[in-house]
Amino acid sequence: MKASIPILCYRNISPVCGITPEEFRSHLEGLRERGWKSVALDQVIDYMRGGAMLPERSYVLTFDDCYLDNWVHATPLLREFGVTAAFGVVTAFLHDGPRRPDATTAGADLRAMPMARDAWDMAIERNDPTAFMNREELAALVTEQGHGLFGHTHTHQACFRSNKPIASDPGDIHPGVRGIYIELHEGLPMYPSGSAYAHNGYWPATSDPQLEHGLVERGTSERIEFCLNEFMLCRERLEELTGRPARAMSWPWGEYEDAAIDAAVLSGYEAALSMDRGPNRPGTPLYALRRVRMQGGVGGRELARRMFIAGHAPLAWLFRKTYRPPSP
């Protein structure tokens, strides 16, 4: 039986949200102590397509969204432990700027690290993407530190997946909803949200946020056109940045379905990362590679358990879970 390759999914490595740098260090220490070896995402794609076998206890480490805290807190630890990773870029947030200090920079003031929600609010509402890594930093990940990049769509767009209003506290609203309503204000109705790539979705009937004319449902052909534009633009911008093929993407919120997969294929991607649970070995759908979700509070014993399950194909299959939206 071909080995299953665990793919870990991280987001924030920060003292203020997500996983603390101390926790992340303990993860890297635990993986090393148990003999796990990081490999590049491209190697796993080749393996999944019937290519060369990978070393025993291989795994892939990925980060979605490319928050600045990945540059500040995660990459110094990756260098220290000799771990290779891949970072998912939302290309609408690409911006220019100098390389910023990281946690190894003497005297650097790192207190202003924003929360993840604030990073999205800044980027969407104020057109200020500086809480995400800039072009200089992303290029350095590839050319100087040996990491890889993958697409995480162009805008990471949400949609309303239902037209039935829900009661919600403003603090519970996903930042992606700010891309549905041009401007959020008190009194706007809220609806269950989801990925605009996996759901046709319901959208405000007017672009004027002060008017409430209900919602209109998008057609499948409109969604496919949207996916094609988003996926291709994302891939082109990544390849322009690195000068290398962008072979993989990841599904926002882990949601995907057949039309979105078709758009990913037509856009030139060879694989896509989901948030499904299950084995990764030859025969696993290339556009639904499974990942192990990582979050704060995961200690050494729990990490070892998750790696054991994900690396053991029959167990990974037993604990499988998918995030495909239900068929209409």
Image: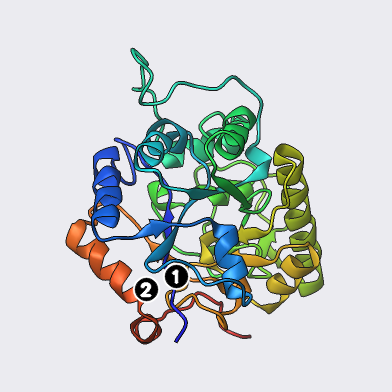
The image shows residue 40 at horizontal and vertical percentages of 53, 55
The image shows residue 31 at horizontal and vertical percentages of 29, 56
132 or 38, nearer to the observer: 38
* Residue 56, image quadrant: bottom left
User: Do labels 1 and 2 touch, CB within 8 Å?
Assistant: yes
| Image quadrant occupied by the C terminus | bottom right
Give the secondary structure at mark 1.
Answer: loop
**Which residue is under mark 2?**
311
Give the secondary structure at mark 2.
Answer: helix
The image shows residue 315 at horizontal and vertical percentages of 33, 83
Instruction: Identify which amino acid the numbered label 2 is placed on.
Output: Gly
Answer with left or right where residue 292 lies relative to residue 304. right
Characterize the local packing of mark 2: few (<14), some (14-19) or many (20 or more) Cα atoms within 10 angstroms: many
The image shows residue 8 at horizontal and vertical percentages of 41, 60
* Residue 133, image quadrant: top right
Q: Residue 5 carries which label?
A: 1
Answer with left or right where residue 202 lies relative to residue 76. right
Asked if one can make out residue 218 in the rendered structure from this viewpoint, the answer is no
Looking at the image, which residue is at 42% across and 62% down?
A: 59
Looking at the image, which residue is at 57% across and 30% down?
A: 137
Q: Which of marks 1 and 2 is nearer the N terminus?
A: 1
Characterize the local packing of mark 1: few (<14), some (14-19) or many (20 or more) Cα atoms within 10 angstroms: many
320 or 326, nearer to the observer: 320
Give above or below for 44 relative to 136: below
Asked if one can make out residue 145 in the rendered structure from this viewpoint, the answer is yes
Looking at the image, which residue is at 63% across and 69% down?
A: 198
Looking at the image, which residue is at 58% across and 32% down?
A: 140
